[in-house]
Image (cartoon, rainbow, N blue to C red):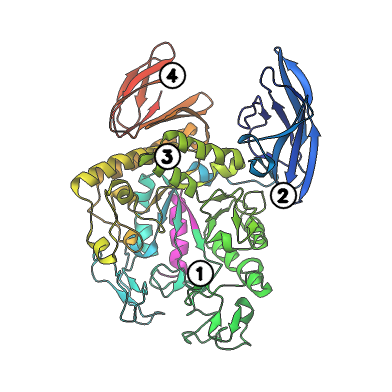
Amino acid sequence: MYFDSRDIRCKQPYGAVTHGTQVTLSVYPERGEAIERVVLVVHGEFADTWEEYELSELRLDGKRVFRTVYTAPAESELVWYHFKLLRADGTEARFGKNGVQPWESLATWQLTVYDGAGKTPDWFGRGVSYQIFPDRFRRGRRRDVSEMVGNRTLHEAWDEMVEYLPNAEGKITCSDFFGGDLLGIEEELGYLHSLGVTTLYLNPIFEAASNHRYDTADYRHVDPLLGDEDDFRSLCAAAAEHGIRVVLDGVFNHTGSNSVYFNAEGCYPDVGAAQSEDSPYAGWYHFTHFPDEYDAWWGFKTLPAIEETDPSYIDFIIEGPDSVVRHWLRAGASGWRLDVADELPGVFIERLRRVMEEEKPDAYLLGEVWEDGSNKIAYSTRRKYLLGAQTHGLMNYPFRNALLGYLLGGDAAAFRESMETLRENYPPAAFYGAMNFLGTHDTPRILTVLGYRGEWPQSRETRARTVLNAAERCRGVRLLRIAATVMFAFPGSPTIYYGDEAGMDGFEDPFNRETYPWNREDQDLVAFFRRLGQLRGARESLQSGTIEYLIADGRVLAFLRAAGEETSIAACNAGEAPVEVCLPWEGDTALDALTGERFPAADGLLRLTLPPLRALLLIG
């Protein structure tokens, strides 16, 4: 039997579909196969429905074809389907993604059915994003931490090593600060603009005791070490003049234990939930033994977990006339990134999106999800992030994982398969609106991942002292150039984690969160990222074009992006030896937009040698 859900001869239209779409499915039996009937078996997971549809037998070009038209449900759904084969001898078989298999081992195809009525803002996916860990990007003015919440220390020198050892009590406190602030970011908007940045994603900016600020103390106030609300409004206004939008990190699953709302140590005048069961915030948290035993994020007592369905919390964060979500959108933000989206109830995300669209219709809602978000199961619940009522797009960890797998020795075919699975499963707007990245504050620096050889050091002390040697850095930079080329040429928003473009290295947290190396950047690498950003901003094919894989074999990956008459081809060799390739090309020559080198073409073909550890971005 032949059926390929990505082949338009077998399934039309391609990929995910909107409510009520007519989907044509065609199955091709092998010549001589004694199949008398074919039945489509459909399982709607959310509605828990099972349906069967008989396929009609046709003859096309002398070949037998079994075909039916399936009408997608009128509501958002995750549909799983396979085919039942009835043979002339009366036996029955099941046919799925893994071929003809017994029922218990059958793999079924996925059809994502989503609500296409809502509009996804396209500004995010078309442009370039830049992620900043605010304390570590740039210091605009000197501030005093003595009166601020928490036991903060402030580094004197910008280039000092981050604190990485436990304190005398054996705890990692994340309480050392460098004083990066909103003014410092505003002062470097010209630099970000030169990189082609159109979206600035900020890790949490609200008052908190730690340098990462994921332990929110007060959603209403910018952390005083970063500035104040006026500074935020000024940053957003100045960013807009450069064509840059600002996306904030929404940490709504938990707060800090030292917060206005929990107030475990009495740092604030308000009566917190840990101080009295009559606190106005008491319903936000779940105590198993008041006041010392309570639900906390992954068991961290400094991060008490929120009961997100509490009406007063929903009113405070989302729906009130001056809710947190509304307030900061009015102050200049253009979107929210939802921290640990897997741990937020679906109804919470839906209500948040509705309010965002009321307040600012083109605001973007991004979710932190580490897997394929179309079929993710979190806490025994199948999530509905991309079905039209929740997030617009997701952080694309599958992209990073697949690309690293290829660059670090894997087959390019595995990258293609992983990305084609996403393209098939995701609604088009979500695929083109994904946040693609090579690293974040939660991963080791990309240059270290690509360049470091051998076993990673086990102790924090050793990791703090370990740097890439000259050979490792050289190889890492060459692979990073390939990775960046793929990322900037791929559908979705290419996202730079601050300093990756400058050649920063480092292992995991906190070594991936060191200060930006002002005046110590790898200027050649910065120039390379700048060129990629310029190309992304200038070429429609890179922003919105279709994608077609030309080669995905071994160490070679080549794909074409096309929009109208404009085409761009990314051609990469992650291997150690040069490779001869032949690519389709209209015109007499092709230009590598990254180096200015031209290659002759003839008879609609471009024959060239890809050097080892090299990527080309070919344009007409």
| Direction from residue 603 to residue 114 in the image, left or right | right
Residue in view at x 54 percent, y 51 percent: 394
Mark 2 to mark 3: distance in Å?
Answer: 36 Å
Q: Earlier in the sequence, mark 4 or mark 3?
A: 3
Q: Is residue 166 magenta?
A: no
- Residue interval drawn in magenta: 227-247
| Label 4: how many Cα within 10 Å (few below 14, some 14–19, many 20+) | many
Front residue of this view, candidates 93 and 477: 93
As helix, strand or loop, the secondary structure at mark 4 comes to loop
Residue 80 visible in image: yes
Q: Is residue 22 above or below residue 131?
A: above
Residue count near mark 3 (Cα–Cα under 10 Å), binned few <14, some 14–19, many ≥20: many
Cα–Cα gap, marks 1 and 4 = 53 Å
User: Dot 4 corresponds to which residue?
Assistant: 585
Q: Is the C-beta separation of discs 4 and 3 under 8 Å?
A: no
Pointer 2 residue: 45
Answer left or right for 601 relative to 86. left
Instruction: Give the residue type that dot 4 points to.
Output: Trp
